[in-house]
Image (cartoon, coloured by chain):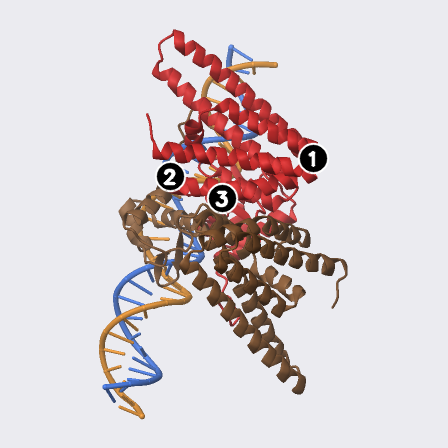
Chain colours: A brown, B red, C orange, D blue
DNA sequence: ACGAGAAAATGATCAGATCACTTGGTCATT
DNA sequence: AATGACCAAGTGATCTGATCATTTTCTCGT
C-alpha cells in the first residue's frame, strides 16, 4: 500500500469533510434536508470560510451535499452511497457508448432475475409508474407528430419534439433504475444507476437511434410482467434480449449512419 | 429533464471545472502528469485563487486531479472515468457488506466469462503477477506465524501480521480488478473496481473472517487457469463459487461471531 | 563529487469585504 | 380577503491580498 506505516496525515480538509459528514449523520438528516450555513460551519469548526467551502465542494462532488445559491446547504441525493456516476464525465465516444451498453447487457439481466425473486412492493409501483409515464409521453408525441403532418414543421415544434425525446429517455432510464431497486440490493441499484444516469444527453441519442419507442415500451412492460409474476428466468431473458436488441441497433446505425 | 426550458445556468465554477478538464484533454495529459499551478490557473481563467481551488477540489473528489502540497497539481488516476467508488464512503455496516458481496457475486461471474473470451494479453500478465504477489505474502505470513509459535506473540508481531493481512487483501482485490480488465471493457472494469476498492479496511475484515488464505489463492489460480484456457463457462462457474463461498463464510460468521 | 543549507515554487489557510440570489414579510392595490 | 409589487434579511459566490507549510531546486562549502 501507499502508506505502510499506517499513519496517514489527514489534512485539515479531510477532517473537515468527514466531520461534516458525521455531523449530518448524527443529526439523522436525510436527502433534501437543509444542513447549515457556510458561515456557521466556519464558526463551528473554527476555520475560515474558503476552507469550509473547499470541503463542501468535495462533498458536493460526491453528491453528499448540495449548495443552493441564496438558500443554503442541503443534504444531497447520493449521501452514503458506495458507487457513484462521475458527475464530470465527458461525453462518451461511440466506442465508449457501446462498451457502456455491453456492460449493462451483462449486469442488468441477472439483476432483473433477482428482482423477480424479491420484487419489493414499492419498487413494483415505481416500475408501473414509469411505464405509465412513458406511455403518456409516447401518446403525446404521436399526437404532436400527427399535427405536424398537417401544419408546417416549425423549429419550435422540433424543439418540443426534442424535449419529449429527452423526457422519454429519462423515463426509460428510470424504469431500469426502478427494476434494479426491485432487487432489494442497494449496491446493485447504485451500480445500475451509475451506468444509466451517465450522460442522459448521450443516452438520448441512443433512443433517437433506436427509434422504435413503442417496441421499447412493450419490452419494458414484458419485463415488468415477468418480475411481477415472479419468473426470474423469463425476466432475465427478456432483459437480455431487450439490451442486446438496443445494442444491435446501435451497432448497426454506427456502421451505416444516416441523416 | 429537470430544466425543461433547456437554459441551464452554468455557474462560474461549472465552467471552470469543465474548462480545466478540456485543458487537460487538449494537452493530452495522462494520469500522473503535472498539470498547472493554482496561481497560473487563476491568471489563465481570470478568476481568484479560492475559486480555482474550489473547482480543483471538485475535480479532486472525482479523481480527475490530485493536489500535492508544495509540489503542484497533477492529473489523477480516475480521469475520464464514468463510474467511481465514493471516496468519502462511510464504513459499511455488516448488512451493507453482505449486500456488496451479493452484488459482486452477481456481476463478476459474467465478467469472468467475458474475460475468458477476450483475455487481453496485458491483463493476463497482471493477473499472474497478482497471484505471485499473493503467494509470496502468504509464504511470508506463514513463516512469521511459525516464528510466533516459538517466541512470544508480541504486540509488534501482531501489528506486522495485521499489515500483512491488509496487503494480502489489497492484492486479492487487485486480482479481481485485473480479471475485470481482462474483459477488455473499461466500463465493466470501472464497475468492478468500484465495488472492490470500497473501503479496503473493511474488506480486510472479510479476509480476516474468511481466513483460509491458501484456499482463496487456489480458487483465484483456478479462475486464472480457466481464463487462460479460454473457457468462459468454467471461469464463470469458478468465480461464482468463489464469491458465493466467501459470502457463505461471512454470513456464517456474522450469525455465530467469535473472538 | 557530495551533502547541508538557503532560496524559490507551490499548495494550504486565513481574514474581511462585496456582489448575487433566494426567501419571507410588508403593504398597497384590487 | 386575495393578489401582486416591493423591500430587507439570510445566504451562497467571488474577489483581494496576505501569511504559513511543504516540496523541490539551487548553491556553496568541504
How packed mark 3 is, by other alpha carbons closer than 10 Å (few <14, some 14-19, many 20 or more), is: many
> Considering only order in the chain, which callout, 3 or 2, is on the residue closer to the N terminus?
2
User: What is the x, y in percent for residue B140?
Assistant: 50, 16
Q: Are marks 2 and 3 in contact (CB under 8 Å)?
A: no
Q: Secondary structure at mark 1?
A: loop
Confirm whether residue A61 shows in the render: yes
> Considering only order in the chain, which callout, 1 or 3, is on the residue closer to the N terminus?
3
* Viewer-side residue, A27 vs D12: A27
Q: Chain of mark 2?
A: B
Q: Secondary structure at mark 2?
A: helix
Q: Which residue was labeled with disc 3?
A: B103
Q: Of tags 2 and 1, which is closer to the observer?
A: 1
Q: Is residue B94 left or right of residue A192?
A: left
Q: Secondary structure at mark 3?
A: helix
> Considering only order in the chain, which callout, 1 or 2, is on the residue closer to the N terminus?
2
Q: Which residue was labeled with disc 2?
A: B94
Q: Is residue B99 left or right of residue A140?
A: left
Q: Residue at x 49, y 44 (%)?
A: B103
Q: Are marks 2 and 1 in contact (CB under 8 Å)?
A: no
Question: Label 2 to label 1, Cα distance in Å?
Answer: 36 Å
Q: Which residue was labeled with disc 1?
A: B230
* Viewer-side residue, A10 vs B140: B140
| C18 w.r.t. C29: above or below | above
Question: Label 2 to label 3, Cα distance in Å?
Answer: 14 Å
User: What is the x, y in percent for residue A167?
Assistant: 54, 68
Amino acid at each position: 500500500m501507499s502508506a505502510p506505516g499506517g499513519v496517514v496525515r489527514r489534512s485539515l480538509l479531510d477532517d473537515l469533510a468527514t466531520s461534516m459528514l458525521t455531523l449530518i449523520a448524527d443529526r439523522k438528516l436525510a436527502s433534501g434536508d437543509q444542513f447549515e450555513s457556510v458561515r456557521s460551519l466556519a464558526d463551528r469548526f473554527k476555520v475560515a470560510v474558503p476552507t469550509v467551502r473547499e470541503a463542501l465542494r468535495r462533498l458536493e462532488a460526491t453528491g453528499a451535499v448540495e449548495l443552493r445559491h441564496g438558500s443554503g446547504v442541503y443534504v444531497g441525493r447520493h449521501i452514503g452511497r458506495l458507487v457513484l456516476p462521475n458527475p464530470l464525465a465527458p461525453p462518451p465516444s461511440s466506442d465508449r457508448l457501446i462498451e457502456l451498453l455491453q456492460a449493462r447487457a451483462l449486469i442488468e439481466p441477472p439483476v432483473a432475475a433477482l428482482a423477480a425473486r424479491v420484487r419489493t412492493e414499492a419498487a413494483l409501483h415505481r416500475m408501473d409508474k414509469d411505464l405509465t409515464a412513458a406511455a403518456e409521453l409516447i401518446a403525446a408525441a404521436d399526437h404532436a407528430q400527427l399535427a405536424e403532418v398537417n401544419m408546417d414543421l416549425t423549429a419550435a415544434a422540433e424543439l418540443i419534439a426534442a424535449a419529449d425525446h429527452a423526457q422519454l429517455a429519462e423515463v426509460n432510464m428510470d424504469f431500469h433504475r426502478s427494476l434494479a431497486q426491485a432487487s432489494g440490493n442497494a449496491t446493485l441499484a447504485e451500480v445500475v444507476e451509475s451506468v444509466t444516469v451517465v450522460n442522459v444527453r448521450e443516452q438520448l441519442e441512443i433512443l433517437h437511434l433506436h427509434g422504435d419507442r413503442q417496441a421499447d415500451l412493450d419490452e419494458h412492460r414484458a419485463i415488468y410482467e415477468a418480475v411481477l409474476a415472479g419468473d426470474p428466468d423469463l425476466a432475465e431473458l427478456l432483459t437480455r434480449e431487450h439490451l442486446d436488441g438496443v445494442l444491435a441497433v446501435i451497432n448497426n446505425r454506427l456502421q451505416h449512419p444516416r441523416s
